[in-house]
Amino acid sequence: MSDYANWLTPELQQTLLSHQGNNPDEQAYFIYQLDELKKHLLTLQEQNVIKLWYAVKANPLSRIIQTLDSSGFNFDVASSGELKQVLAQGIEPKRILNTGPAKSLSQLTEFLTEGVEIFVVESLNQLNWLQQAAKSLNKCPKVLLRVQLQWQEGEKNPLGGNSLTPFGLSIAEWQGIHIEQYPHLDLCGLHIFQWGNMLSNEKMYSLWQQMVTPLVDLAQSIGMELKILDLGGGLGVDYLEEGQVLSWPQIISDLAKIKAQASVEELWLELGRYAVAHCGFYVVPVIDRKVNYQQEQLVLAAGINHLIRPAITDQPFPVRLLRESQAENINFDIHGPLCTSMDKLGHLPLPDDVTVGDELIFAFAGAYGFTESMPFFLCHQTAAEYVIENGLMTEVRTAQPASWYLA
Ligand SMILES: *Cc1c(COP(=O)(O)O)cnc(C)c1O
C-alpha cells in the first residue's frame, strides 16, 4: 500500500491490454484486483485494537463483499437494498449494523425481522420507532446513538466548518432522552463520523482526541454505560497523488490511546474507501482529441455517467495511458460524452502522443465508482465490471445498452 505512484503495474497493464471485450455494448469497464484487496484487508486485520466494519456504499459488488467477508470484516449497511445484497452473499445478520438518516418504522421492522441486532440511531423518532418495533418483535437490539458535534465560534474547531448535516443529533438533543423509557433497547454506545478523506495521521488523531471528552460526558449525563465507540470512516485516499498517505500502524497506536481514554470495551471503524479504493480501476477509450483556445482536450466514451465523483468533489481520480509511451506528459482537460460541462474527469497529465482509440485507466476506482454515478443521463451504455482473482480476469456484470433501462 505504500508505493501508490506505481499503481499501474506491468502485470495489470498486460492483462488489460490483452482484454478483448466481445460485447459491442462494452464501452468502458471497472476492474477490481481481488488478490490485492485480500492482502490489503489482511494487513488491516493484523491488530486487536479495533473491530472493522465495511461501509457497503463504497462498493456493493457481490465479489467485493465476499472478499471482505472472508477477511473477517463486518458490514455497515444503510438501506434495504444494501441489506439484501449483503444477506444474499450468505453473511449472518449478526455481523450487520444499520446506519443512515432515513430509517422509517417499516425499515427498522424489516431489519429486525431479518435478524439485524445493531443499530446506529440518528434521531429521536428512530429511537422511539426502534423501541416500538423491538417490543412488538420481542427483541432487544444494541443501539449506538449518533452524535453530531459543533464547536462554539472562536473555539478550536477540529472540523473546519460547523456545517449542519442530517447525520445524528447534537449532544443537547440526546441529553433529553431517558434511558429507562427504552427497555427493549440495549443503549450501549455512541457513533460519530463527520469528516471526509483525511490524509494526515496527526489531524485524524487530534480530531478523534477532541471527541472523547464530549462523548464520555454525554454518556455519563444520560446514564449510559459507554461500552462501544464507533468512529465511522473517513480515512483518506491520495486522489491528487500528492504523496500523502496515512500510516496504518500509526492509526492503530493512536486508536489504542483513544480506546484507553474513552475506556470503552470496543472501538469500531467503518471503512469505505480506505478498504477498497485501491483495488479498483476504471478503463475507458478516447473518442476524440482537440485543441480549443490553446487547451488540449480529450473526450472519452464515458465520463461522469460512470464515474461521477470528480464532478461532485472536485477531486479527480489519477489517470494513466494504458499502453506504453515515451512521450512527455502534458496537461489535458479530460471530458466525458454528456452534454453538460459538468462531465469532466479532471485536468491531468498524460503523454503527449495520446490519440483516438487509446485507452485510459483511472485508479482508486474501487470505491465510489459504479453505484455512485449517473448512468442514465443521455442514454449511454452502462459500465461492465470485472474482477481479477488468481490472475484470472472474469466478468461479474456485463455492460448494457440504454434499451435495458429505458421505458
Ligand atoms: C460513507 C460512510 C462510511 C465510509 O466512509 P469512507 O470515507 O469511505 O471511509 C462509514 N460510515 C458511515 C456511516 C458512512 O456513511
Image: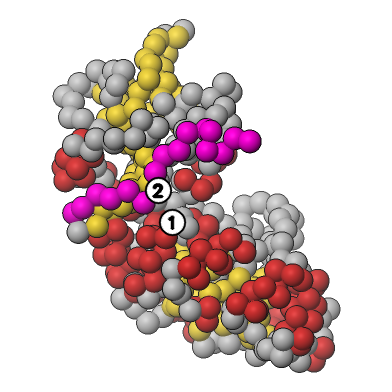
Q: Mark 2 points at which residue?
A: 397
Amino acid type, callout 1: Leu
Q: Is 163 located above or below residue 193 in the figure?
A: above
Label 2 with label 1: CB-CB less than 8 Å? yes
The region drawn magenta spans 391-407
Q: Residue 298 falls in which quadrant of the image?
A: top left
x then y, percent, for residue 336: 47, 26
Amino acid type, callout 2: Arg
Q: What element carries label 2?
A: strand
Q: Is 12 located above or below residue 162 in the figure?
A: above
- Identify which residue is drawn at 21% across, 52% down: 392
- Indicate yes or no whether the magenta region holds residue 406: yes
Q: Mark 1 points at which residue?
A: 61
The answer to whether 400 appears left or right of 31 in the picture is: right
Depth check, front residue: 37 or 407:
407
Instruction: Name which of mark 2 and mark 1 comes first in the sequence.
Output: 1
- Identify which residue is drawn at 23% across, 38% down: 19
x then y, percent, for residue 68: 38, 67
The answer to whether 198 appears left or right of 110 in the picture is: left
- Indicate yes or no whether the magenta region holds residue 105: no
